[in-house]
Amino acid sequence: MAIDNCTTPFSDLKAVVYNFAPTRAGEHARNFLGDWQGKLVCDDYSGYKAGFVNGITEIGCMAHARRKFYDLHEANQSTLAAQALEYIGQLYRVERETQDLPPDKRHAIRYAKARPIADALHQWMLIHRQKVPDGSGTARALDYSLKRWTALTRYLDDGAVPIDNNWVENQIRPWALGRSNWLFAGSLRSGQRAAAVMTLIQSAKLNGRDPYAYLKDVLTRLPTQKNNAIDELLPHNWTPVIVSKV
């Protein structure tokens, strides 16, 4: 499987890192993150849980919370699910309004507009959870959000944090068609090498580079590149060598 981590859509640094692991066991996510401590936008994958008690701040993904209600509405046209989707839709409308703003202004608008919506949604969920039977599809959709409410609304306190992890999921999507092929990478080392190449290609794309031109230039320069200047060849730092013609 491929583990995908990348910077947020609001970050000045545009980069994505893939890693290859043989299973979905949580130990692989823990090993990949190592001693890193920061804000991690993610779904409810259990492999991240240990990191949340070791200094990593969990930022919940609102898109995953929304999906629970969307599936519920698709299955039986639930009016309760429709109401939840309307609330969440209002939160996303605020995000569209602020997507091109700097973090401080985005935070201010979120605080003024999105926070009241989120508070109203939370109260609405608490009230309706008391009215539905345990184990029902509606209860499961409500419980997913209620149990993770603190994480789901942390984005409201930081204008540099996105509302969901759709951005990172979009970075794995170009490789999803080859998912079955990763089962036959040959070995763990081969899979890790493939992940490294994927990292360079996708990071080059994020920085507006042509992957072929980037890799060709880097492979040409690499044998003579000084060790203390290797960072110059990373996609976000790379500048192609221009050869003048006389």
Image: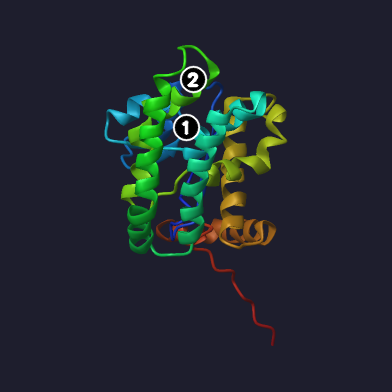
When asked about the image quadrant of residue 109, the answer is bottom left
Q: Quadrant of residue 173?
A: top right
The N terminus - image quarter:
top right
Q: Give coordinates of residue 93: x percent, y percent.
A: 51, 53
* Image quadrant where residue 12 sits: bottom left
On screen, 179 above or below 92? above
Q: Residue at horizontal 57%, vertical 35%?
A: 82
What number is the disc on residue 77? none
Q: CA distance from mark 2 to mark 1?
A: 15 Å
Q: Residue at x 40, y 58 (%)?
A: 228
Please report the residue visible at 53 percent of the width from the left and 64 percent of the height from the top: 238
Q: Earlier in the sequence, mark 2 or mark 1?
A: 1
Q: Is residue 102 above or below residue 55?
A: below
What kind of element bears circle 2?
A: helix
Q: Does residue 83 appear left or right of residue 176 in this picture?
A: left
The residue lying at 45 percent from left, 12 percent from top is 134
Amino acid type shown at disc 2: Arg
Residue 161 placement (x, y as % from top left)? 39, 49
Q: Residues within 10 Å of mark 2 (few under 14, many from 20)?
A: some
Q: State left or right for residue 219 relative to residue 36.
A: right
Compared across the picture, whether 191 is left or right of 98 comes to: right
Instruction: Indicate left or right for 229 with 180 as reference.
Output: left
> Residue 218, image x and y in percent?
59, 58
State whether residue 159 appears in this view: no
Is the residue under label 1 in contact with that under label 2 (CB below 8 Å)? no
Identify residue type, mark 1: Asp
Q: Secondary structure at mark 1?
A: loop
Q: Position of residue 110 (x, y in %)?
A: 37, 54
Task: Depth check: give the residue in front, 26 or 111.
Answer: 111
Per the image, the residue denoted by label 2 is: 140
Q: Where, quadrant-wise, is the C terminus in this rendering?
A: bottom right
Q: Pointer 1: what residue? A: 43
